[in-house]
């Protein structure tokens, strides 16, 4: 069971970035816990601030991984290319957002990705990633 978590722009700053919105925990720290919680899964984490690099990673993993958990950050609201990539690959993708984007600025309310994803988990903090992994392990696979 190979599950890849992909984080997009600015999510390398989790823990330091607007902690009132995104919390004070780094993703690396959370990911260590996640790996311990799901020893039965082969979990991989990838982050990039670059749209093209994210596209390449989706293409690379999207025909071999069993599931992808994607938080594309602000690219969620702008990138038709990422939406096309999610549609193009075979691996199912779950969209995650740490904050409840629907309680924030209007420009965050639309996602190009949602319609191409299996589902979306929004506003549950880092727990959203855990729930997405759980879904892949317990329900989808
Ligand atoms: C985010 C929400 C986006 O609107 C924002 O640009 C991010 C993080 C979230 O996880 O809440 O970078 O995807």
Image (tube, rainbow, N blue to C red):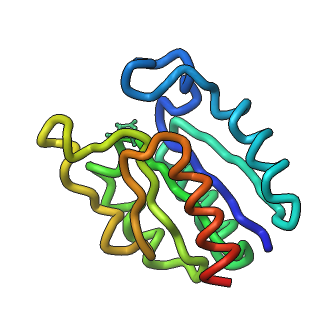
Residue 84 placement, left or right of 91: left
Write down which quadrant ligand 1 falls in.
top left
Residue at 42% x, 58% y is: 121
For the residue pair 94 and 48, the one nearer the viewer reads as 94
Residue at 43% x, 77% y is: 87
Q: Is residue 88 above or below residue 13?
A: below
Task: Return the x and y of residue 80 as percentages of the image width and height.
Answer: 31, 61
How many numbered marks appear? 0
Residue at 54% x, 20% y is: 24
Residue at 48% x, 78% y is: 88
Q: Quadrant of the C terminus?
A: bottom right
Task: Return the x and y of residue 19 as percentages of the image width and height.
Answer: 45, 19
Q: Quadrant of the N terminus?
A: bottom right
Q: Is residue 132 above or below residue 79?
A: below
Figure quadrant of residue 4: bottom right
Residue 84 placement, left or right of 128: left
For the residue pair 64 and 114, the one nearer the viewer reads as 114
Task: Return the x and y of residue 117 as percentages of the image width and height.
Answer: 42, 72
Figure quadrant of residue 110: bottom left
Residue 99 placement, left or right of 110: right
Residue 99 placement, left or right of 1: left
Q: Is residue 1 above or below residue 9?
A: below
Task: Return the x and y of residue 65 as percentages of the image width and height.
Answer: 72, 72
Q: Is residue 124 above or below residue 28?
A: below
């Amino acid at each position: 069971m190979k599950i890849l978590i992909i984080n997009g722009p600015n999510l390398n700053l989790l823990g330091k970035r607007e902690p009132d919105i995104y919390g004070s925990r780094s993703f690396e720290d959370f990911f260590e816990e996640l790996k311990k919680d799901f020893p039965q899964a082969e979990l991989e984490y990838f982050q990039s601030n670059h749209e093209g690099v994210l596209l390449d990673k989706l293409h690379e993993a999207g025909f071999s991984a069993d599931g992808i958990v994607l938080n594309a950050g602000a690219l969620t609201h702008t990138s038709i290319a990422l939406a096309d990539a999610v549609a193009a690959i075979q691996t199912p993708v779950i969209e995650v957002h740490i904050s409840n984007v629907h309680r924030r600025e209007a420009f965050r309310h639309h996602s190009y990705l949602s319609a191409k994803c299996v589902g979306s988990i929004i506003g549950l903090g880092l727990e959203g990633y855990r729930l997405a992994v759980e879904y892949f392990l317990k329900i989808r696979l």
